Image (cartoon, coloured by chain):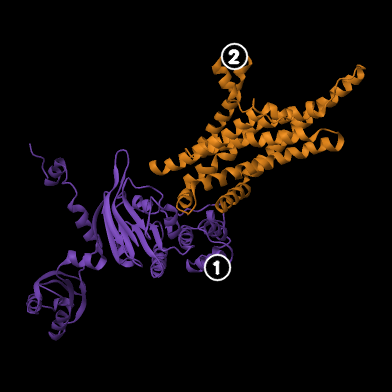
Chain colours: A orange, B purple
């Protein structure tokens, strides 16, 4: 555990001494800020519209602002995750520092967990900036906080899974760009495979749409913890990290 | 301290290390010598548990590298060919990180960081970013990293590669000064380095062990009898070369004397002893004859020659086309 903490601190620090962390935080905050402003504008427009027509539409902050925004974060995250994970192992392999880690009295699992947790923590920082926006809703409105908390839990689980996959891909190459591009491709694929579920009901389509990381987020966005979806994300995390340990071991046998 | 038995590393198409066996005693500095691609780095990586051997065993500090890698790793300090530095960290921070990885903490960690900075003469760059250090400093930080947890065994892969002559000397002195407390294996393809720093040499070529012996033994083994180069002052040809040769031959123990050349200040003779050391007698004979002795030195075979002798012995004969070219006219 102590070793995981040592690696975690080192990784998190190296995110924040390089421009990567600040770049990611800024871009993410900007993009989400736009989403938020947009969603709020639409909500206000709908409110005025309903008053002018003299009818009262059911207006609900949770359903009309928080839920779509959470889904937006989950999709936007797909584009940022490769940038977080691409350097994790590829950089160590390129500079040769992997030899230091691998010849220190530390287990592979501890190295991997430390790095992955640092990636999750950075994503957590990015989520924190979005939470600032939501805080305004509580200041001026009266939304239910539970669905929001569950939504964030879902976001962390989803990102945890994809970050684990990205960590694995980063062990396969010395080249950060290749690691990043591959992870990006895999993230997008894991999103779009769900689209077949919209029109096809054959078994393969069901399997494909089950694999979609975004489909599994829908229940979390509604504020419901569905054990099926939670298990999917936890499995993704476990598999990603498991393959990373295998890959690290095979590094030694191949190199 | 280190026992290696029949250690082998095979890749898909090549055998990088081929049944190597050797032992290193506590406190020894051992030079691992071989041309580039001989299998030095692979062997070292197996000793540090970075690579698992294909067959054979290696024990470091009485722990098997395959069965108890964590115990081995606790007891070794390793400097790979390129020092494993994180360019964005500063020196003190980096050493603290490595120290923690190796299991140090608290006061002890702080003391060790200060100690290795002092020892490796890097205290003046403690707050500098590693990415901006010169090659010499990077190498020394690499060395500091290797000794931070005071390991029983130090494994250094080409510790002087890429340094300028002054830095090379400093690094060698540093390594020599570490010898008392640590058992050291260092690899190199530079021969004088082994002559100057190591007590024992392990020569490998193409993955195979060629020789393992002390530096002194290797030299005398290749040399056999003593060969001396003697220069006797001769101003404007005042020295009678014939007479000098005769006089030198009469010295007891001298086998043969050959006149080599006249240089600016005198004439040089090459003397081979029939057996044992004769340099004292030769010097006395020259002075008694009333000549001036400018220089007398043993023509010790350098490790370079020994190395070539040993590694060329099992090299395949040159291909026939090459022989023809060397013989001059191609046969028709």
How many badges with numbers are in the image? 2
Q: What number is the disc on residue B111?
A: 1
Quick check: B81 above or below B296?
Answer: above
Nearer the observer: mark 2 or 1; the answer is 2
Residue A22 image offset from top left, x and y in percent: 66, 44
Which residue sits at x=7%, y=78%?
A: B243
Foreground of the two, A87 or A203: A203
Residue B174 image offset from top left, x and y in percent: 42, 67
Q: Are marks 2 and 1 in contact (CB under 8 Å)?
A: no
Q: CA distance from mark 2 to mark 1?
A: 67 Å
Q: Which quadrant of the rendered structure holds the C terminus of chain A?
A: top left
Foreground of the two, B89 or A238: A238
Residue A254 image offset from top left, x and y in percent: 39, 41
Quick check: A158 above or below A206?
Answer: below
Foreground of the two, A163 or B242: A163
Residue B259 image offset from top left, x and y in percent: 12, 70
Q: What number is the disc on residue A28?
A: none
The reply, left or right, for residue B240 in relation to residue A155 is left
Instruction: Name which quarter of the figure residue B151 lies in.
Output: bottom left
Question: From this viewpoint, is residue B160 visible?
Answer: no
Tell me the crowding category of disc 2: few under 14, some 14 to 19, or many 20 or more residues within 10 angstroms, Cα based.
Answer: few
Subunit bearing disc 2: A
Q: Secondary structure at mark 2?
A: loop
Foreground of the two, A72 or B245: A72
Subunit bearing disc 1: B
Query: What residue did someone put label 2 on?
Result: A201
């Amino acid at each position: 555990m102590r070793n995981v903490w040592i690696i975690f601190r080192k990784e998190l620090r190296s995110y924040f001494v390089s421009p990567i962390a600040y770049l990611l935080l800024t871009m993410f905050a900007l993009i989400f800020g736009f989403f938020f402003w947009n969603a709020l504008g639409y909500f206000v427009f709908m409110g005025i519209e309903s008053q002018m027509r003299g009818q009262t539409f059911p207006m609900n902050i949770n359903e009309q602002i928080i839920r779509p925004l959470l889904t937006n974060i989950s999709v936007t995250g797909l584009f940022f995750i490769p940038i977080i994970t691409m350097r994790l192992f590829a950089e160590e392999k390129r500079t040769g520092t992997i030899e230091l880690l691998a010849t220190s009295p530390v287990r592979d699992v501890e190295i991997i967990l430390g790095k992955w947790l640092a990636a999750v923590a950075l994503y957590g920082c990015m989520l924190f900036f979005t939470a600032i926006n939501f805080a305004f809703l509580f200041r001026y409105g009266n939304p239910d906080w539970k669905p929001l908390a569950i939504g964030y839990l879902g976001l962390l689980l989803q990102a945890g899974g994809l970050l684990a996959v990205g960590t694995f891909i980063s062990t396969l190459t010395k080249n950060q760009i290749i690691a990043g591009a591959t992870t990006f491709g895999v993230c997008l694929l894991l999103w779009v495979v769900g689209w077949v579920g919209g029109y096809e009901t054959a078994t393969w389509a069901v399997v494909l749409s089950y694999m979609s990381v975004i489909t599994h987020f829908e229940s979390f966005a509604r504020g419901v913890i569905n054990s099926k979806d939670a298990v999917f994300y936890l499995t993704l995390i476990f598999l990603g990290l498991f393959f990373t340990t295998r890959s690290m071991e095979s590094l030694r046998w191949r190199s | 301290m280190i026992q290696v038995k029949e250690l082998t590393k095979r890749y898909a198409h090549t055998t990088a290390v081929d049944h190597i066996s050797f032992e290193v005693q506590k406190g020894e500095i051992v030079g691992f010598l071989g041309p580039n691609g001989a299998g030095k780095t692979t062997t070292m990586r197996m000793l540090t548990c970075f690579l698992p051997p294909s067959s054979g065993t290696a024990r470091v500090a009485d722990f098997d590298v395959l069965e108890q890698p964590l115990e081995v790793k606790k007891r070794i300090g390793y400097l790979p060919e390129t020092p494993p530095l994180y360019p964005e960290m500063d020196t003190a921070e980096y050493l603290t990180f490595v120290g923690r990885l190796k299991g140090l903490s608290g006061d002890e960690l702080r003391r060790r960081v200060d100690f290795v900075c002092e020892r490796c003469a890097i205290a003046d760059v403690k707050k500098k970013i590693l990415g901006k250090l010169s090659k010499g400093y990077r190498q020394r930080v690499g060395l500091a990293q290797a000794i931070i947890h005071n390991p029983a065994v130090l494994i250094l892969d080409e510790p002087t590669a890429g340094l300028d002559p002054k830095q090379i000397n400093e690094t060698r002195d540093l390594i020599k000064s570490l010898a008392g407390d640590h058992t050291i294996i260092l690899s190199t393809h530079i021969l004088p380095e082994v002559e100057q720093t190591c007590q024992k040499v392990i020569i490998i070529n193409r993955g195979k062990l060629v020789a393992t012996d002390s530096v002194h033994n290797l030299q005398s083994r290749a040399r056999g009898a003593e060969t001396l180069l003697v220069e006797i002052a001769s101003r404007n040809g005042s020295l009678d070369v014939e007479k000098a040769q005769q006089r030198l031959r009469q010295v007891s123990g001298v086998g043969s004397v050959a006149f080599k050349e006249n240089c600016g200040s005198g004439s040089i003779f090459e003397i081979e002893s029939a057996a044992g050391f004769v340099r004292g007698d030769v010097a006395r004979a020259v002075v008694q004859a009333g000549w001036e002795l400018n220089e007398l030195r043993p023509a010790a075979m350098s490790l370079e020659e020994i190395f070539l002798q040993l590694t060329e012995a099992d090299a395949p004969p040159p291909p026939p086309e090459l022989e023809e070219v060397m013989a001059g006219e191609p046969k028709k």
